[in-house]
Each structure stands twice: as structure tokens, then as C-alpha cells.
Image: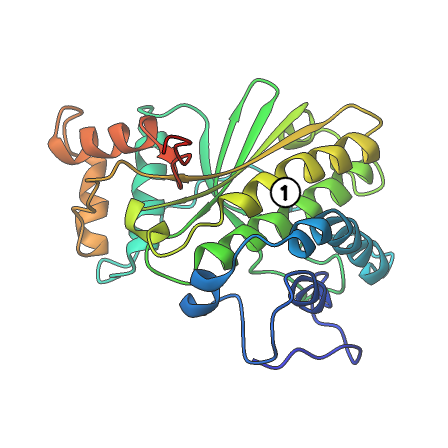
Amino acid sequence: MVHLIGGDMKSIFDGMDELIYDALLLGSHQNLKQKSTCAKLSATEDRIKNIEPLVTDMYARIRRNWTGRKPSSSNWKLRRPSELNPNNRSAEVLLERAIVILSKRGLLDNWYNQMPIASGLLDSSSDKRAAIDWVHIEQERLELIELKWASDTPLYAIFEILRYALAYLFCFTNRELFDFQDLPTMNITQIKLTTLAPHEYYSYCDLSWLAAALNPVINALYREESDGFLSCEFNCSSFPINFKLLFETGGDVLALHDLPVDHPSIQLLLNALCNQHPAWEPKSNSR
């Protein structure tokens, strides 16, 4: 993977890769999507010390990249797209649509998906595919969820949701300029950032130190930029250990529209959302 600095920008997030790689002390042959890089990334004093300036610099990069353009009005709007090709076999897409179908049926309160977050901040075609997989909003609390099944790595997922969280903060601080002030997603006081994946997804690495380091830093930035109005919590979560996806195709998921509420597939999905676990269990201090 080649990371270029300068040149024509194509995303509001341009330049962030270099910041992340430098802060994590990664070599030129390493990248966030490599399992080997993720597995070997350990907590060092220098890496932990770099987290605070990294988050600040990432946010500053968004502000620096912004061209002064008013972004798309589609950003941060709650939506529930559930269209699905019956032949689709992507586990992440199937699971994402399954939960939204249950939400549409009234079996889950206030769950949404594929919410655009940065479309048009740079130009008319920029960042149209940048979207939150799942959104859960309840009263004054907004949870932004990056869903993974087998793709990428936990390391990549952490920085993906972090980028989106910084885009949220930028849009929140400019909500009146962007005409976002009346959106439900802009009228909350608490943000929760979550990576959510199967238990096995996290099994070959331990990035609990990174999540722990990010949590107070992103919260402090949110509080500072919002004059104390917003707080932010960061965590990595897993589905229950034995949770397996029962769907093989989009057709299986579309059948959820008509299945009875007590059907095993529906109950399994509801249970999986309600019984999440920490991605990495706290280590015992016992000898």
C-alpha cells in the first residue's frame, strides 16, 4: 500500500494514514489491514504517548482538508435501506440488513444503517461511500457502530470508526453552517463508538491497550470542541462466543420480513445484539 502526501485530495480523510502509521511506529511494509501487523502491534510507551497528539492531528487534518464547501444534506440523516440482492453472500451485508429489517418490523427500537457522514465536504463527488454501518439512537445517546465479520482487521476497524467520529465532531461544530442543527443525530449529548464483530475476529490480537488509550483522548477532544456539551466513549465489542450467522444468501435475509417473531433466526439475532461482550477480556492479576 502506497501512502502519498500532497497531490489532489479525494477525501476529507486524506493524509490521515501517514499520521496513524507514524504514531503507531509502523514500517513501510506494514498496513492496517494486515493480520500480521495487527497481531504484532504491542503497547509500548512511545505508542501510547503518541495517541493524544494523533487524535488531535487527525481532527486538525479534517479541518485543514475542508474546502469551505457546504456538504450534502444526506449526511447524518437516519435511514434504513434494506434492499438486498437475493444472491448476495457477504456476511457483513446480510447481517446489517437483517438487523434493519427487524428494526423496520418494530422488533428493535431506533436502529438504522448506512448513514452517510462526509459526502460532499470536499467536492460534489467526495466520500459518498463513507457511511456508518449501524446507528443506534436513544434519547440523547448516539451509538456509531462499525460492523465487521471477516474483512479487514480489528486495527483497521478501530481507526475507521475513529475517522467517522472525528467527521461527526466536525459536522457538529458546524451544524448550523451545514443546516444540520435540526437532525436528531445532532441533538444528542453522548456519543458511543463501537467496533462489533464475532468473538473470533479479535482472537489473534490484543488491542485493548489501544482502545483504552483512545477512550479518554477522544472524550477530551469532544468535550473541548463542543464546550463541554458532548461526551464520547470508545469500545470494541464482540457478539456472543457461539454466535453464528444462519443466513447464506440475501434471500434468506429477505425472508425475515415474514417470519414469526419467535422464529429461531429472529431470536438469535436479538440475543446477539443484547448480549455483547468486550472484545478482549481484562487480564487477571493473579499469579
Provide the residue designation for mark 1.
214
Which residue occupies 22% across, 62% down?
A: 87
Measured as percent of width and height from the top left, residue 229 is found at 77, 23
For disc 1, the neighbor class at 10 Å (few under 14, some 14 to 19, many from 20) is many
Q: Nearest the camera: 233 or 11?
A: 233
In the displayed orientation, state which residue is furthest to the front.
Answer: 287
Q: Quadrant of the N terminus?
A: bottom right
Give me the residue at 70% from left, 69% from top.
Answer: 18
Q: Kindly identify the residue that appears in the image at 29 percent across and 50 percent down.
A: 200
Q: Secondary structure at mark 1?
A: helix
Q: Which one is nearer the viewer's eye here, 225 or 135?
A: 225
**Mark count:** 1
Camera-side residue: 212 or 112?
212
Looking at the image, residue 178 sits to the left or right of residue 285; the answer is: right
Q: Quadrant of residue 204?
A: bottom left
Considering only vertical position in the picture, is 263 above or below 253?
above
Task: Tell me where residue 143 appears, x and y as whole percent.
Answer: 53, 33
Q: How is the image coloured?
A: rainbow
Residue 249 x, y percent position in the rendering:
19, 56
Q: Is residue 202 above or below residue 215?
A: below
Residue drawn where x is 39% and y is 32% of the image? 284
**Position of residue 157 measured from the top left corner of the image (x, y, whole percent):** 50, 54
